[in-house]
Amino acid sequence: MSSITTTLTKIQTVDLPFPAIDRSDAVVITDAIRATGLGPGARFYFDPASVEMLGVLLAIGEPALGSNHHARFTRAVRRPSADRESLELEIPTEGLRALDVDALPDSEQATELSVWAGSQLLGFGVNE
């Protein structure tokens, strides 16, 4: 993961959900999001090019702003309805492709992701 480890700390490991009819690649990463200093409504910009350069998918965060603007690689932190304390973030399909995660996995095993965090910054990598 190169020199990015001086900026990020590994916080948790999560399973990427299996695909469903209404596919959502949202992962519950409450601890990692809190470690960024951000919370519900914060927005993260995912940089798929970071995987090739650094070996990790970076997501740069900013606090919740009044607008509900949705950009191609930007996703907002949400609270899943089942647990009001949990925080989840959707990973864009382009980010998963950059990590070499198939959109429809062939195996019955879930893909496990390592999640790193720093000040307003997240990193994602596939556990092998």
Image (spheres, rainbow, N blue to C red):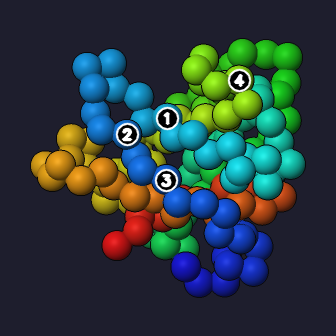
Residue at (79%, 55%) from the top-left corner? 35
Residues at marks 3 and 2 touching, judged by CB atoms closer than 8 Å: no
Between circles 2 and 4, the one closer to the viewer is: 4
> Which part of the image, by quadrant, shows the C terminus?
bottom left
Separation (CA) of disc 1 from disc 2: 7 Å
Please provide percent x and percent y for residue 5: 68, 78
Residue underneath mark 1 = 26
Q: Is residue 60 left or right of residue 16?
A: right
Q: Is residue 44 left or right of residue 67?
A: left
Task: Assign a secondary structure to mark 1.
Answer: strand
Please provide percent x and percent y for residue 37: 86, 48
Residue underneath mark 2 = 17
Amino acid carrying mark 1 in the image: Ala
Separation (CA) of disc 3 from disc 2: 9 Å
Residues at marks 3 and 4 touching, judged by CB atoms closer than 8 Å: no
> Does residue 85 appear in this view?
yes
**Mark sitting on residue 14:** 3
10 Å crowding of disc 3: few (<14), some (14-19), many (20+):
some
